[in-house]
Amino acid sequence: MTQRPGPTGRTTTTTTTAPGEATPQSGRPQSGRPQSGSPQSGSPGAGGPSPSARPYPPLAEPRPLAEHRVWPRAFHDRLTAPLPGLKALARFAREGAVRPTPDGLADIPRLPFAPGPLPRVDARTIAVTWAGHASWVVRIGGLTVLTDPVWSRRILGTPARVTPVGVAWEALPRVDAVVISHNHYDHLDAPTLRRLPRDTPVFVPAGLARWFHRRRFTRVTELDWWEAAELDGVRFDFVPAHHWSKRTLTDTCRSLWGGWVLTDREGRRVHFAGDTGYGHWFSRIGRRYPGIDLTLLPIGAYDPRWWLADVHCDPEEAVRAAQDLGARRMAPMHWGTFVLSAEPVMEPLVRVRAAWERTGLPRENLWDLPVGASRTLT
């Protein structure tokens, strides 16, 4: 989301390190952006993590579902860039643009929207359907999993969605699980979640279970980075992202943020990045989860760059992240649904296609889906 924190987010609080991984200190040098002339991690076909490589470090044993956890009060030490201070806020108030120009909005009718029926699947099929923004219907290991489900027409503080939801709620099969990346309103939507049975298994970042318990959800599993849980043979691993969390004036970084790696019984993997800037975590995720079959990566809400670079990938960075992950396929998301920033509405798609072509990777491995469309991996 394009909202950035105020000076209240600048206090640093010490918390425990994520299991099996040293946590970088706050500060821009840790953001993972390549220095001039520095080598990049390899692509899936050129030096990326080998699908046959062993995880490094080894994967954690799955934790019990819905266990009670005690967390630090805040997670400021997980930030990979400092939250903006008064000087940055003053600059944004002076020159920041939060919407495209009229010319940039003129292409809204051209935004790709092609809803269709959900594909037929079995326990050995992986299928994804893009409902819009960061909301996917992921079919894996016989489960139907929703990612950051937002079926609302509008979210707090943001104009109404410019493309309809790609999948009618009534067309969904039974939802077996939900994964949440973080608590920003465009990723954690209370009206949508109220539609779910309260015994739906929900997987959330550390510190976010209380939000769900207050809404009477009974099967909430909260995880730290690099931790995992398992549901009906599908493994849910919570992995780092370059972002932050905030939902009210007083809860900056009180819950964690991240992405998810879903692994079926045959070892096939789908990575859902959530909301993230570009940085060093992608190559580390790729080493720990070699052979990612598909990564769902954000490509929008990136302009002005000086304001959003630390928390949102631009299209070129998203393609680089897919290479760092060693992912075989990439599906772009987080664009073409809500107007959250100043780039022209069609620009993310144009740029991600050009960036993918420059890598020389197979064109069919870029799953640049219209809202509502599906792809299947058998």
Image (cartoon, rainbow, N blue to C red):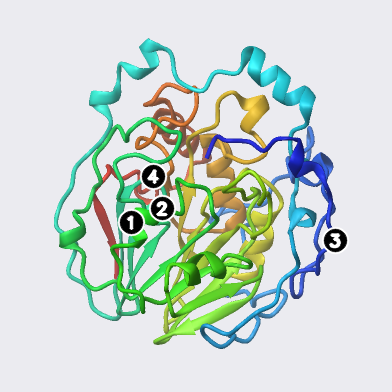
Badge 3 element: loop
Q: Is residue 72 above or below residue 318?
A: below
Residue under label 3, please give it: 14
Contact, mark 2 vs mark 1 (Cβ under 8 Å): yes
Reply above or below: 15 against 348.
below
Q: Which mark is residue 297?
A: none
Q: Which residue is mark 2?
A: 189
Q: Is residue 290 visible from the viewing direction of this image?
A: no
Q: CA distance from mark 2 to mark 1?
A: 6 Å
Q: Residue at x 49, y 72 (%)?
A: 213
Q: Residues within 10 Å of mark 3 (few under 14, many from 20)?
A: few
Please provide percent x and percent y for residue 209. Answer: 55, 70
Image point (45%, 80%), residue name:
219
| Mark 4 or mark 1: whose residue is earlier in sequence | 4
**Amino acid type for the residue under numbered disc 4:** His
Q: Label for residue 133?
A: 4
Spot occupied by residue 60 in the image (x, y as percentages of width and height) = 65, 82
Contact? badges 4 and 1 (CB < 8 Å): no
Say whether residue 316 is left or right of residue 113: right
**Which mark is drawn over residue 192?**
1
Q: Position of residue 188 (x, y in %)?
A: 46, 54
| Label 1 crowd bin: few (<14), some (14–19), many (20+), radius 10 Å | some
- The answer, for residue 217, to whether it is visible in the render is yes
